[in-house]
Image (cartoon, rainbow, N blue to C red):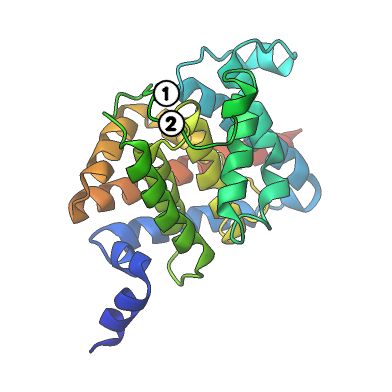
Amino acid sequence: MSETTSASLSDPLARIAALPGVSDAVAETRTLVDRLLGHRILRRRSADVSMESSLRGACASAALEGAEVAMDEIREGHVYDTRIKGALRTSGELGTLVDTWPKAPRQVLARLHTLAAADAVSSEALGRPRRADERVEDPLETGQAPPPEAALARMEGLYSLLRARTSVPALVTSALVHGELMAVRPFGWGDGLVARAAERLTLVERGLDPKSLVPSELGHQTLREEYAPALRQYMGGTPEGVAEWVIHCCNAVRIGAQDSLATCEALKRG
C-alpha cells in the first residue's frame, strides 16, 4: 500500500485534497494569503484590518441571503434587516469561538445560529436542529434539503471530522464545512450565515488566517453567479463536483485576501 493510499484511508479529507485541480488552487490561495499576512501595515494596524474585514464579510454574507446592504448606512449604525443584524452579530463573536470549535463543534454551531437568527425565529428554535414540520429557507435555490433524520446523521459525520485532526490544508477542511452545512441546512433559517461563518472560523482555527483578516464571505458574494452552481455540484457528490466546490472556495478566499490587501494599502497611504 502506498503512503498516499494509506493517508487517504486514515484521513477521509485526504481524498478530497488529492482531487484534480485542488492542490493548485490551494497553493495559489495560500501564496496570496501569506502575502497579506506579511504586509507591513499589520505590525501596527492588524486590528483595524481585521475589523474592516469582519464588517465587509458580514455584509457580504447578508447580501447572499437576499438582504439589501448599504455599507454607508451600516457604518452609521442604521441596521434594520434581520439578516444583516444576524450576520454582524455572528461575525463579531467569531474570535471567542476559535478554541471551542475543534473540541465542541455542535455547541459552536448552535451558538452561531443563535446569533444569526435571534431576530428571525422563536427563542425555542434558536440553536436547535430543525423539525420535520418547519420550513427550510433556500435563498440560493440549491434544492430540497434532506429530512431532519438524514440531516442529523450527516451533521454527526461532520462533527467527527472536525474533532479529528487532519493533515489536509485548512482550505479543504473549511470548504467541506461550508459545503456540508449548506447541503444539510440543519437549522432551516440562517444556514447560509452560519455556514459562511463556520468556513471563516475554520480558516482561523486551522491557521491559514490566524488574525481573521480575510473576508471569504466577500469572495463568495463577488463570485455569486458561480456560488450556487458550485454548491449544487458539491451536493451531487461526484469527485468532479466536490473538486469544483473546493476550488470555488479557494477562489473566494483569494478574493477576500485581495480585498484586505487593498485595505492595507489604503491604511498605508493614510
Label 2 Cα crowd, 10 Å radius (few <14 / some 14-19 / many 20+): some
Q: Callout 2: helix, strand or loop?
A: loop
Q: Position of residue 189 (x, y in %)?
A: 48, 25
Q: Is residue 27 left or right of residue 237?
A: right
What is the secondary structure assignment of the residue under circle 1?
loop
Q: Position of residue 207 (x, y in %)?
A: 59, 61
- Which residue lies under the disc numbered 2? 131
Which residue sits furthest right?
A: 44
Q: Residue at x 37, y 28 (%)?
A: 224
Q: Are marks 2 and 1 in contact (CB under 8 Å)?
A: yes
**Is residue 82 among the parts visible in the rendering?**
yes
Dot 1 crowding, Cα within 10 Å, few <14, some 14–19, many 20+: few
Type of amino acid under label 1: Glu
Q: Which amino acid type is marked by label 2?
A: Arg
Image x and y of residue 166, in percent: 47, 70
The N terminus lies in quadrant: bottom left
Residue occupying image coordinates x 25% and y 87%: 2
In the foreground, 133 or 260: 133
Q: Nearer the viewer, residue 129 or 159?
A: 129
The reply to whether residue 87 is in sight is no
Q: Nearer the viewer, residue 249 or 79?
A: 79
From the top left corner, tell me how far across and down residue 69 is, in percent: 55, 15
Residue 72 position (above or below residue 55):
above
Is 214 placed left or right of 75 in the picture? left
| Residue plotted at (62% across, 17% down) | 71
Count of marks placed on residues: 2
Whether residue 257 sits left or right of residue 152 in the image: it is: right
Residue tagged 1: 134
| Residue at left offset 48%, top offset 33% | 187
Per the rendering, the mark at residue 150 is none
How far apart, in angstroms, are the residues tagged by discs 2 and 1? 5 Å
